[in-house]
Amino acid sequence: MSAVDERVPCARDMRPGAAAFVARLTARQPLPLDYTVASLRVVDFLLDGLRKGGADREGAAGTLFGLGAYVGEVLVRHAGAVWVDLDADQRAYFGQPVGVRMPDGRVWNPLGKVVNRFASGSPDDSLRTFYLTLHGRARRPAARRGTVSGGPGHPSGI
């Protein structure tokens, strides 16, 4: 999406939007943007390059959105997330129209996370770390009466 596109994206736009962004970006320069978790380091590197190149948030808005869509799509493909349209309260909180819902039910904001990483420039805001923090937080099924979660025979049991 370009910075001049005034159409508000929705959840169903995010997968094709991420793919179109990657196609445009990799047509100019070969980059390993293959939707793997390891490729999130490339996103961190690209954001560092934008900052060092003197880009401002407004001028980089389209690229930041595209990178945010890419990060969200990595969460969708590898962590079981799904793209969701945010409600009015979530939009106000996150400052974005879409986010991802993780298997544990929590909603996260990869678009805003990319903007924050760009703004801070801090390795502490790494997108790879963001993924690793969220991945694997699957909602536990409610224990049935009379059963002990984690006991012998349970997948996580000892």
Image: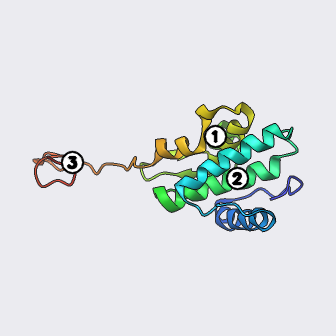
Mark positioned earlier in the residue sequence (1 or 2): 2
Query: In the rendered image, is residue 118 in sight?
Result: yes
Is residue 48 placed above or below 21 in the rendered structure?
above
Amino acid beneath label 1: Asp
Closer to the camera: disc 1 or disc 2? Answer: 2
The image quadrant where one finds the N terminus is bottom right
Q: Residue at x 81, y 52 (%)?
A: 62
Amino acid beneath label 3: Ala
Q: Which residue is mark 2?
A: 67
Tell whether 113 sits left or right of 24: left
The answer to whether the residues at label 1 and label 2 have Cβ atoms under 8 Å apart is no
Mark positioned earlier in the residue sequence (3 or 2): 2
Tell whether 119 sits left or right of 60: left
Q: Which residue is mark 3?
A: 143
Tell whether 121 sits left or right of 138: right
Q: Please rate how many residues cluster around mark 1, counting C-alpha atoms within 10 Å: few if below 14, some from 14 to 19, many from 20.
A: few
Element at badge 1? helix
Distance from Cα at disc 1 to Cα at disc 3: 32 Å
Query: In the rendered image, is residue 98 in sight?
Result: no
Q: Which residue is mark 1?
A: 89
Q: Residue at x 66, y 49 (%)?
A: 43
Q: Residue at x 55, y 53 (%)?
A: 38
Closer to the camera: disc 1 or disc 3? Answer: 3
Amino acid beneath label 2: Leu
- Between 67 and 50, which is closer to the camera in this rendering? 50
Report which quarter residue 49 is drawn in.
top right
Q: Residue at x 67, y 42 (%)?
A: 112
Tell me residue 148's x, y (percent): 13, 45
Element at badge 2? helix
Is residue 36 placed above or below 111 in the rendered structure?
below
